[in-house]
Amino acid sequence: MSMRKASLLLALVLVFVSAGTVVAAEPEVVPAGVLTRGEFAALLVEAGGLEGELPPADLLVEKGIMKGYPDGGTYLDQGITRLEAVVLAAKTLGLEGSIVPPAGVEVPLPAGHWGYNFYAWFVRQGLVEGGPTEIISREEGEAFLKKVFGSDPAAIALQEEIRAKTLEMENMAMRMVMSGNMTVIPRAGLDETEEFPEIGMKMKLTQEMVMPDRVHQVMEMDMAIPGVGEEKITTETYIADGKMYQRLPDPETGELKWFRQPESLFPNLDEVI
């Protein structure tokens, strides 16, 4: 047998062996408790209140929320990663193209990664934690969607609207960072029993204003309170369309929660500016 014929025969044998291996391979079995992409799609459609006649995954594809992998496959039987869940939830909320990654948030992803902005923003909001590439369980997936769509939906929706409109507006935008020290000093003439203890405070204020009437403000305070010790509080405020929302510590639990303040608490920005 010539060398050329031997080479051709060897090539044919390799082809048939490879083909046989592919046919004989058993399908991947998802471990018990792991949430698949298809299952998450169903949970997401329900949590997000999406309407349509198509199956959940097909509905997400139709709405441009789920695009699949580069080869076009959606791989619904494959476990879903924490990052994939975040991105799908963000797109369902309408955040694609408008979300801005917050400063000072560290996530184990390069800044240019396709999911960096989404993941950093969700981490900042306290909606997700853990490695982005880890496969999540059904329990975690359900808890995550409950946080995103069940807790403070009005406040989350407001943030999304402001971020989207902020990027679209052509009016002037201003950003201001302010820091300093402040001490509360009792007013002269008060009885000793009425005097307040001095509170040392350092404050950092970051404010973004989109003219004429939209404001996003983050205030970080370090306070030294007698009898209590060091306290660090971060508050967040959004003003838009004549309404003010603040993320403040709950008086009873101390946890940060969103509150809508009475309109009488802040001035008409159109008149002030």
Image (cartoon, rainbow, N blue to C red):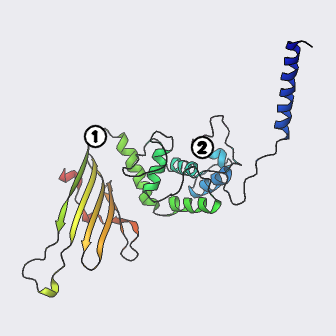
Instruction: State the residue at coordinates (49%, 59%).
Output: 127
Residue at image location 39% in from the left, 67% down from the top: 256
Q: Classify mark 1: residues with Cα within 10 Å, few (<14), some (14-19) or many (20+).
A: few
Q: Which one is in front, 59 or 1?
A: 1
Residue bounds of the magenta highlight:
63-72
Residue annotated with mark 1: 171
Residue at the far left in the pictured view: 189
Name the amino acid type tagged 1: Asn
Tell me if residue 202 can be seen: yes
In the image, residue 242 sits, relative to residue 99, either above or below, namely: below
Q: Which residue is labeled 2 in the image?
A: 66
Q: Is residue 73 left or right of residue 228?
A: right
Secondary structure under tag 2 reads loop
Magenta stretch mostly in which secondary structure?
loop
Residue drawn 40% across and 55% down? 158
Mark 2 closeness class: few <14, some 14–19, many ≥20 residues within 10 Å: some
Image position, residue 264 (x, y; %): 25, 65
Left or right of residue 16: residue 43: left
